[in-house]
Image (tube, rainbow, N blue to C red):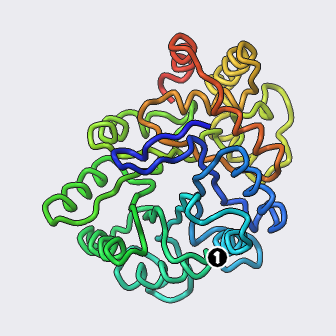
Amino acid sequence: MEYRRLGRTGLKVSTICLGTMQFGWSADEATSHDILNRAVELGCNFIDTADIYSRWAEGNAGGVSEQIIGRWLASGSVRRERIVLATKVRGEMGSGPNDQGLSRGHMMTAVENSLRRLQTDYLDLYQVHWPDEETPLEETLATLTDLVRAGKVRYIGCSNYPAWLLAKSLWVSDVRQLARFDSLQPHYSLVHRAEFERELQPLCLDQGIGVIPYSPLAAGFLTGKYRRDTPLPESARAEGVRQRYMNEQGFTAVDKLEAIGRIHNATIAQTAIAWVLANTAVSAAIIGANSIAQLEDTVGGAAVSLTPEEKAALDETTAWA
């Protein structure tokens, strides 16, 4: 496993970050713990979750993924200091008017709840999940700064921020001497590129922002289970995948991933991960898993090194994605 700096910081993270949205949803607690243990064995030191995971699952009130991770940490399977633990705040965690957002009131409550569920006294990376138009940036960044100074949070990051808002956030941090975002979680894959590459990528490279893409396999489309003239697989995400990615450009990308993967004895998914990691702006790719087998297959992408010519050939298939 390769380890890269998170942006301009001195923090080293594995190039594969284990995303845990499935925990408590499509992976039960025992399976989730097995996945966590195997991920560590494979060299992953980076785990990403969020307080709202898996609030959408029937019977869940949110915080379930954090609770599962917390019980795993408490079991002593791994020393806490070996793990770079990241979670997120912003989503609705209750029915009250202040049970969501990036206000000081909500964030101060949310961080304590996340720490309690995760059974830890600090977070390596605390991220705002998406923007909150009703709260001033100054309030959000000042609150995050207080959490850093209190030792409850070591680094801060953002997710789903457009370039203009990330740039404004960095400016506010600079002029007001507040903690600054050191990472960004964008939606990024071979078939979803323009949103990140046009403006966010040059900004992140210029400002030393670590990039942690989510959905690098395009909700499973870049695994090879969605092919031309074949029935949709049984999946809750299948219809969304059909509408977004199942077109000639998408299938051409899958075909090219398969062809280049054969050269490296790699699967389509592994080659798709290798393409994301070939981007010098990327610190780590976030992958999810419902099983050990799925985890092992995807993590294998970290060991695949594409040549410049192979990357360029893949780039060409989705130049306007």
Going by the picture, which residue comes out furthest to the left? 175
**Is 90 situated left or right of 230 in this image?**
left
**Is 301 situated left or right of 112 in this image?**
right
Q: Nearer the viewer, residue 299 or 45?
A: 45
* Above-or-below relation of 109 to 229: below
Q: Which residue is drawn at the image coordinates 31% and 43% (left, top)? A: 208
Q: Nearer the viewer, residue 162 or 295?
A: 295
Q: Position of residue 84 (x, y in %)?
A: 54, 58
- Quadrant of image for the N terminus: top right
Residue linked to disc 1: 62
Q: Position of residue 21 (x, y in %)?
A: 66, 60
Q: Position of residue 52 (x, y in %)?
A: 59, 71
Q: Which residue is drawn at the image coordinates 56% and 75% (left, top)? A: 120
Q: As shown in the figure, which amino acid type bears the numbered disc 1?
A: Gly
- Kindly indicate the quadrant of the structure image that contains residue 62: bottom right
Going by the picture, which residue comes out furthest to the top? 309
**Is 256 situated left or right of 106 in this image?**
right
Q: Nearer the viewer, residue 99 or 268?
A: 268
